[in-house]
């Protein structure tokens, strides 16, 4: 048998193993391993025990309690040695008392408040106008309060003095952003015992000083106490701005969604049931009622009197700010959302007799009359015709597929209805955008409100005479309005040939004429707006974006339409002791 000789590497490895074995024996590692594998005490345990005992043998330094510091023995400089030592003890600080303004004034019971009579109010206004006419100024009378404030008053918050007829000065704070008087106005009103019906003439004699003349409503029988025009001659040279008349309007309450919660809690459900019954009889109920509400709200009768303080100037509200912009100085109007459209006149001179209102369908009037009868059977003499019309207008929108919205209530019915005032207050179908904006602006409605409310043309119809000029004699260069879709124009020519019966009508929305939706705006995008006042909303760049937004977003249109209807229902409202609650919507109470 032959045995091969080990390699050099193998010999070296074996040699290292032998060396390692000797080292392990020298270190007694084999014995230590055996000791760890047995439960007997081991050197490691002994070692650990020794370590712990060593710790116990270490001396720990005892803690010495801290001695309290004697603050009275602090070293003091010789410069203050003879002064009392400083105390570092915290002492409570008494809050600074703020002097409160007090007035020798007892608040009246608002439930028993007395409003100015019509005679007294008229007297105060006449005297104020006479006084104004005697105050010369190099500036013309103003039309908009915003313009007056921007032109004549500071552009930042500033204290403005009110100087009465006895030269007593009362400081007030002018708020530039709100364009009104705040701090100090309450005190002025109380000190001068202003009441409902008083008229005030404000004459700006310095950039930050008003001369105020008060014409008392209760001076109607004592005319000698009213300020004489000759008494203010000395101020003519100092007048640097316009003279403004403020008629203190009391009795103007706020509309409320829950106005009849106690007096007639079921009014909305009663009206809703009547509207639904009428709707089942004829679908014309929907556009007729909606259009009736619009025509009622938009017609106001101007009396050319500057009114201010439209926030219920009552004794309880003397703490309110005298706002110039938000409440505004504006012309006094009769009409608005007061059911004046419902009045029937034997002389044919009421609003409903105006040419623009002759096309109003009788179903709208009938809806309100029947709803009023149903409400009167449950709540006699409580709910106004104006409120019933507002609720009915909301209900027909919902019946046609629109979104419901809350209706503010508390209106009273108007006492004037004139056919002569209608044309100047309603937008004409041939109006351009600027003309439309001007009409709506008079009602405190914006361009967006205009575009939104025009969406009501998604239902209803219009007579051929209202748009015939777009088909046959638009201009010298084009008989047909070039903004109108050619195919749509041909359809309209077939429905409305020249010299057609004026009773012929065409749907405002050729696609979904009986559904309240946003298709009206989609029609405008393709030139299918029936009236000039419709299509101009898209052709004019200033309003095009809103039209596109509504065309692409039905939810946006529905929500905005409800908001616009609420604003429309606030136009020219009468509340409190203004107007009346008619027993019959078609006639004033006797």
Image: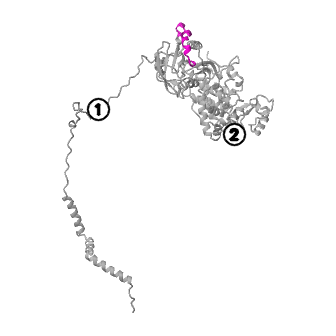
Would you say residue 566 sits in the magenta stretch?
A: no
Q: In what quadrant of the picture does the C terminus appear?
A: top right
- Residue 153, given in percent of the width and then of the height, sits at 54, 23
- Does residue 223 appear left or right of residue 359 in this picture? left
Check residue 226 for magenta coloring.
yes
Choose mark 2 or mark 1, whichever is in front. Answer: 1
Bounds of the magenta segment: 219-244
Q: Secondary structure at mark 2?
A: helix
Residue 117 appearing in the image: no
Mark 2 or mark 1, earlier in chain: 1
* Within-10-Å neighbours for mark 1: few <14, some 14–19, many 20+: few
What percent of the width, then of the height, locates residue 267? 57, 27
User: How many numbered marks does the figure carry?
Assistant: 2
Q: In which image quadrant can residue 287 be found? A: top right
Whole-percent x and y of residue 69? Answer: 21, 40
User: Circle 1 sits in a helix, a strand or a loop, which is it?
Assistant: loop
Judging depth in this view, the residue of 195 and 566 nearest the camera is 195
Q: Which disc is residue 172 wearing?
A: none
Residue 132 quadrant = top right
Mark 2 → mark 1, Cα distance in angstroms: 76 Å
**Residue contact between numbered discs 2 and 1, judged by CB atoms under 8 Å:** no
Horizontal relation, residue 542 to residue 209: left or right: right
- Quadrant where the N terminus sits is bottom left
**Left or right: 386 as drawn, with respect to 464:** left
In terms of depth relative to the viewer, which is nearer, 302 or 109? 302
Q: Is residue 231 left or right of residue 74?
A: right
- Report the residue marked by disc 1: 91
> Would you name the residue on which mark 2 appears?
525
- The residue at the point 69 percent across, 20 percent down is 420
Determine which quarter of the picture holds residue 18.
Answer: bottom left
């Amino acid at each position: 048998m032959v045995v091969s000789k080990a390699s050099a590497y193998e010999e070296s490895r074996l040699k290292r193993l032998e060396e390692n074995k000797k080292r392990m024996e020298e270190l007694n590692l084999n014995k230590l391993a055996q000791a760890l594998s047995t439960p007997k005490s081991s050197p490691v345990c002994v070692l650990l025990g020794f370590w712990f005992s060593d710790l116990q043998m270490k001396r720990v330094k005892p803690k010495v309690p801290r001695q309290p510091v004697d603050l009275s023995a602090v070293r003091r400089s010789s410069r203050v040695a003879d002064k009392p030592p400083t105390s570092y003890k915290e002492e409570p600080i008494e809050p600074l008392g703020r002097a409160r303004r007090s007035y020798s004034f007892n608040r009246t019971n608002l439930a028993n408040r007395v409003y100015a009579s019509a005679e007294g109010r008229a007297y105060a206004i006449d005297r104020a106008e006479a006084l104004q006419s005697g105050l010369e100024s190099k500036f013309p009378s103003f039309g908009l309060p915003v313009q007056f404030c921007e032109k004549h008053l500071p552009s930042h918050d500033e204290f403005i003095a009110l100087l009465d007829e006895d030269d007593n000065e009362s400081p007030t704070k002018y708020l530039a952003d709100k364009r009104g008087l705040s701090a100090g106005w309450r005190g002025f009103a109380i000190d001068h015992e202003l009441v409902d019906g008083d008229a005030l003439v404000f004459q700006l004699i310095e950039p930050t000083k008003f001369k105020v003349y008060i014409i008392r409503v209760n001076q109607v029988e004592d005319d000698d106490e009213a300020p004489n025009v000759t008494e203010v001659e000395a101020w003519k040279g100092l007048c640097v701005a316009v003279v403004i008349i403020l008629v203190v309007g009391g009795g103007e309450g706020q509309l409320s969604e829950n106005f009849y919660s106690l007096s007639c809690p079921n009014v909305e459900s009663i009206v809703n049931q009547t509207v639904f019954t009428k709707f089942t009889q004829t679908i014309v109920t929907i556009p007729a009622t909606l259009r009736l509400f619009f025509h009622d709200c938009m017609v106001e009768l101007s009396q050319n009197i500057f009114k201010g303080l439209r926030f219920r100037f009552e004794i309880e509200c003397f703490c309110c700010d005298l706002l110039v912009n938000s409440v505004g100085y504006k012309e006094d109007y009769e009409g608005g959302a007061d059911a004046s459209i419902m009045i029937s006149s034997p002389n044919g001179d009421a609003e409903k007799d105006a040419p623009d209102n002759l096309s109003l369908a009788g179903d709208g009037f009938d809806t309100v009359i029947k709803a009023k009868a149903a409400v009167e059977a449950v709540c006699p003499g409580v709910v106004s015709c104006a409120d019933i019309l507002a609720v009915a207008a909301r209900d027909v929108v919902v019946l046609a597929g629109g979104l419901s919205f809350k209706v503010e209530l508390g209106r009273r019915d108007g006492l004037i209805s004139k056919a002569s005032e209608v044309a100047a207050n309603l937008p004409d179908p041939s109006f351009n955008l600027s003309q439309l904006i001007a009409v709506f602006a008079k009602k405190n409605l914006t361009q967006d409100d205009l575009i939104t409310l025009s969406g009501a043309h998604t239902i209803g119809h219009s007579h051929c005479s209202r748009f015939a000029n777009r088909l046959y004699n638009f201009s010298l260069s084009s008989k047909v309005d070039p903004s109108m879709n050619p195919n749509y124009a041909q359809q309209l020519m077939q429905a409305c040939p020249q010299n057609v019966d004026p009773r012929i009508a065409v749907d405002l929305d050729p696609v979904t004429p009986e559904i309240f939706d946003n298709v009206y705006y989609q029609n405008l995008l393709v030139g299918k707006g029936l009236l000039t006042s419709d299509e101009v909303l898209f052709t004019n760049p200033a309003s095009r974006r809103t039209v596109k937004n509504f065309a692409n977003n039905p939810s946006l249109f529905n929500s905005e339409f409800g908001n616009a209807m609420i604003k429309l229902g606030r136009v020219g409202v009468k509340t409190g002791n203004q107007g009346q609650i008619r027993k019959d919507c078609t006639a004033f109470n006797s």
